[in-house]
Image (spheres, helix red, strand yellow):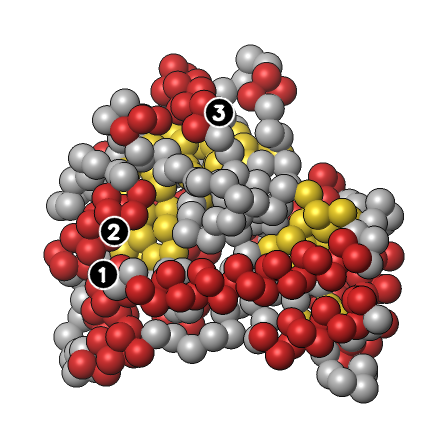
């Protein structure tokens, strides 16, 4: 006999409300502006996917067979080479220490479940944080705690602790000394440390460091995972290309679970990943585009009375006028500018809005004109 739908429990009782639904009326208002909407709310790339990547995808389009969950050796090698070349990470095990995944959000959402966490387990994430950390933990039945202070945990020992540097939404970059202390703290207590480093190449006023760097981890990746994405670096959000690297034992557990679930990165995308990771020129060009947009938007926001906090990296300007974030959202919507309220990212964002750099030059210029008029 099939169980009634009610037996499974409604999503509303298991997960928080989907926050973006609350932004719909403000989007509609912004769309009514005479010169159209300037959408700075979602960090989705708008610039073309690099031609070198598109060509790799075309060349690999004939892919009749199933890929493996482990992924192509050349895909894993490209990830290891990129981490070494661009970020000084050494000692990664190509065979056991890296795994391609179907976008970083999918991995983060499923990670607590994949690792067998559930009721009685605690997952800790930053105070101002990407909502998927909480969503993934709650879906697994685990408890969550938003804090930037390890002392706030008291005697409690989490099963999993997330770091996010550079941060979404604040753009904050954690200094190496702080990261090293967190690595040591987690190892002393047997806590899995998962570092979301998806914005590591979107840095402006600070130099992000991976937790897998030997200066932070002492040359051992035990108890550490780093998550990386090509969505922002290479304008590949539509390809869903990412990877996780670190402790071979934990990566092996993820591989075993994902095999059973049939989670595999499509072969054409894996070849595209190789092309993207092997080519630094397009990433540097995209970095320059975002830097110019960031400079223009920051000047305009500050001229309009905003204070920009943190924001030394990532693709956002964490901005405030010292008022409730929804009041700011409404005021900007009147100008035809849509931004994300900081409350989407936790109570710590109640007086901030997240302003994305991911708009065309023309739309950024329109926002600047409206803010400074």
Looking at the picture, tell me which residue is in the foreground, 306 or 122. 306
Residue 90 in view (yes/no): yes
**From this viewpoint, is residue 19 visible?**
no
How many residues crowd around disc 3 within 10 Å: few (fewer than 14), some, or many (20 or more)? few
> Above or below — where is 356 with respect to 166?
below
Question: Where residue 138 sits: x, y (%)?
Answer: 56, 44
Q: Does the CB distance between marks 2 and 3 fall below 8 Å?
A: no
Mark 1 Cα-neighbour bin, 10 Å: few <14, some 14–19, many ≥20: some
Quadrant, the C terminus: bottom right
Depth check: give the residue in front, 143 or 24.
24
Q: Is residue 271 left or right of residue 286?
A: left
Give the image location of residue 171, x and y in percent: 57, 46
Q: Does 208 sit left or right of 310 as displayed?
A: left
- For marks 2 and 3, give the CA distance: 24 Å
Residue 213, given in percent of the width and then of the height, sits at: 31, 33
Seen at 43% across and 65% down, the residue is 286
Instruction: State the residue at coordinates (81%, 82%).
Output: 33
Q: Which residue is mark 2?
A: 82
Above or below — where is 177 with respect to 95? above
Looking at the image, residue 154 sits to the left or right of residue 198; the answer is right
Instruction: Classify mark 1: helix, strand or loop.
Output: helix
The residue wearing badge 1 is 278
Count neighbours of disc 2 (C-alpha within 10 A) and say few if under 14, some if 14 to 19, many if 20 or more: some
**Secondary element at tag 2:** helix
Q: Looking at the picture, how far across and down is residue 347, in whole percent?
A: 73, 41
């Amino acid at each position: 006999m099939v169980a009634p739908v009610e037996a499974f429990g409604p999503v509303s009782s298991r997960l928080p409300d989907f926050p973006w639904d609350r932004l719909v009326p403000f989007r509609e208002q912004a769309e009514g502006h005479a010169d159209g909407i300037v959408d700075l709310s979602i960090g989705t790339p708008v610039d073309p996917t690099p031609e070198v990547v598109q060509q790799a995808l075309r060349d690999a389009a004939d892919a009749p067979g199933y890929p493996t969950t482990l992924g192509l050796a050349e895909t894993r090698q490209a990830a290891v080479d990129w981490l070494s070349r661009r970020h000084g990470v050494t000692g990664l095990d190509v065979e056991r220490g890296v795994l391609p995944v179907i976008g970083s959000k999918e991995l983060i959402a499923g990670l607590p479940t994949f690792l067998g966490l559930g009721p009685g387990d605690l997952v800790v994430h930053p105070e101002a944080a990407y909502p998927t950390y909480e969503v993934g933990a709650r879906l697994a039945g685990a408890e969550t705690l938003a804090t930037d202070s390890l002392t706030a945990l008291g005697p409690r020992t989490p099963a999993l602790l997330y770091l996010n540097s550079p941060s979404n939404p604040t753009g904050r970059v954690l200094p190496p000394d702080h990261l090293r202390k967190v690595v040591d703290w987690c190892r002393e207590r047997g806590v899995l440390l998962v570092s979301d480093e998806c914005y590591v190449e979107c840095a402006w006023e600070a130099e992000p460091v991976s937790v897998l760097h030997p200066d932070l981890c002492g040359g051992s990746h035990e108890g550490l995972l780093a998550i990386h994405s090509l969505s922002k670096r290479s304008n590949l959000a539509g390809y869903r290309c990412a990877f996780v690297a670190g402790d071979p034992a934990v990566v092996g557990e993820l591989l075993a679970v994902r095999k059973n679930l049939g989670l595999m990165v499509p072969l054409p995308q894996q070849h595209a990943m190789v092309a993207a990771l092997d080519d630094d020129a397009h990433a540097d060009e995209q970095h320059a585009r975002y830097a110019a947009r960031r400079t223009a938007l920051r000047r305009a926001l500050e001229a309009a009375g905003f204070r920009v906090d943190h924001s030394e990296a990532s693709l956002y300007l964490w901005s405030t006028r010292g008022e409730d974030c929804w009041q700011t959202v409404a005021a900007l919507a009147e100008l035809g500018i849509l931004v994300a309220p900081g409350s989407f990212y936790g109570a710590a964002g109640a007086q901030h809005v997240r302003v994305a750099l991911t708009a065309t030059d023309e739309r950024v210029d329109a926002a600047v004109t409206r803010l400074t008029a």
